[in-house]
Image (cartoon, rainbow, N blue to C red):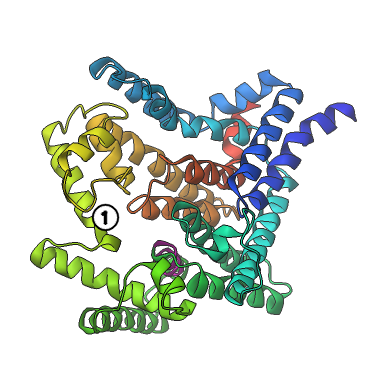
Amino acid sequence: MQVDFKKRLPQEVLAFLPLTLFFPVGFMYLGLLCFFVTFVISADFKHKWQLLRHHPMLMPTLALSLVCGFSLITNPPTDKEYWSHFFHYQTYWLLLPMIVVGAGVWQEKAVRNFFIGALIASTLFYAANWGLLPENTLFRSYIIYQGNKSILLGLLLAVAAAWMLHDWSVHRTHLLWRLLAFVYVLSALILFSKSRTAALLFFLLLSVFLCRNFSFQRWQLALASVILACAGGGLYFAATAPKPVTCLAKEMQDVHRMNGLEIFKNRSICTVQQVRDFGKQGSVSEDGMRLEIYQNTWQLIEQRPLLGHGIGQWLNLYQEKARGMMSEKMTTPHNEYLLYWCELGVLGLFALLALWGQQLLLAFQMARRHSPWAMPLCVLTISMMFAGAFNAILRDALFGLAMMILLAIPLAADDRSQTQGN
C-alpha cells in the first residue's frame, strides 16, 4: 500500500499542474517543485530508467543537447549570461521525468483540471471586462494586456477549446454541458484574451479537427469551400478597411475603451494591413515590429547559416544591427525557428524540427492504435509549431514549462515505451 501510494504521488501532483497554468507563474513553479520532490520520493529509478530509455522523445531531446554542446565548442561562451541561455535550450529534459510516471487515471484528472482552469480563466476574463476584478498580482493578466503572460493565457484557452471538441467527440455524455463549456471558453478567447496568435491558432486547430476524417464527401467539400470563402472574404475586408485609430491592444482597451469584439476586429485588420504595408514600403508600426525583427534576424542568419552565431548571441547582435530602428529594444525574435537557426545554426533548426516531428509521428502512431490521446497530442504539437512562428514558445520558460506540463498528459499514454520498458 505504501509503495503504491509513493508511485501515485507524482501522478497526483502532475494531474493538478495544468490548473496552475492559468494563474501567476509562481504557482506553476511551486507545482513543478512539488512534482520533482515527489518524483524523488517515489524512487523505483531502475524501472523509470527502463521506461525513459525506450521512450521515443529521449533521442530528439538528446540530439538538441548534443547540438548545443557542439555550439559550445564552435562558439565558446563570451559573457556570464551564457549558461542561462544554454539551459533554456534544455527545456525538454524537464518533460522526461513527467513521462515516466506512467499512464493512469491521473491523465483524465489532468485533462479535467485543465478544463476547470480554462473555465476559471474564462470567468475571470468576463469579470475583468465588467470591471469586477481588483487590479492585483493575482488577476492583473486578465485585466491588463501583459505581453507573454496574456499571450500564454490565450494559447491555453485555444488548446483547451480544441481539446474540449475532441473530448466531446469521444465521450458522448452530457453533450449539452460540454457544448456550453466549449462556447463559454471560445467566447472568452475571441472576445477578451486580446491575443491574435491564439485566435488564429484556434481556427487552425478547428480546421485540423474537421479534416481528421476528410474523405471528399460532398458535405465536406461544401464546408471546406465555405471556410475558404469566408477566409478570403475576411482577408479582403481587412485589407480594404479603414486603418484603425490604433493597433496597440493596451491603447484600445485603456484609452479608447473598446470592447473585446472591437479589439479583435481591429487587431485583425491591423495584422493584414501591416503585412501589406511592409511588403510594399518596408515600413512598420509599433504593433507590427515582428516583420522588421524577422527581416533583420534573417540577415543575421545569412552571415553564419551553418554554425550559427552561438548560444545567447542573438540579443547583442540584433541590438547592434537594429540600432535606430523601431525594434532596437526587442529581446526576442518572436520566432523559434529563426532563433534556433541564428544561434545554433542549421543543425539547431533541424533538432527543433526533429522534436516536433517526433511528436507528430507519435500522434499518428497513436491514431493507428485508436488511442484517445492521439488528437490531444496532435493539437498540442501543432499549437507549439504555430505559436513558435510568432513567439518564444520554448526560449521563454513561461511558455516552455507550460507546454511540457501539457505534453506529459498524452505522451505518458504511449504504451509502446512501457511495454518495451517492461
Q: Quadrant of residue 270?
A: bottom left
Q: Is residue 200 left or right of residue 103?
A: left
- Give me the residue at 67% from left, 64% from top: 120
For the stretch drawn in magenta, the main secondary structure is helix
Q: Is residue 258 left or right of residue 127?
A: left
Is 60 rendered above or below residue 384? above
Is 28 rendered above or below residue 267? above
- Give me the residue at 64% from left, 67% from top: 124
Q: Is residue 127 left or right of residue 382?
A: right
Q: Quadrant of residue 288?
A: bottom left
Badge 1: how crowded within 10 Å, few (<14), some, or many (20+)? many
Estimate the x, y position of residue 217 in percent, counting from the top left: 40, 79
Is 185 rendered above or below residue 40? below
The residue singled out by tag 1 in the image is 290
Say what amino acid the circle numbered 1 marks.
Answer: Arg
Question: What range of the chain is rendered magenta?
Answer: 197-207
- Give me the residue at 39% from left, 29% from top: 85
110, 76: nearer the viewer = 76
Residue 198 lies in the magenta-colored region: yes
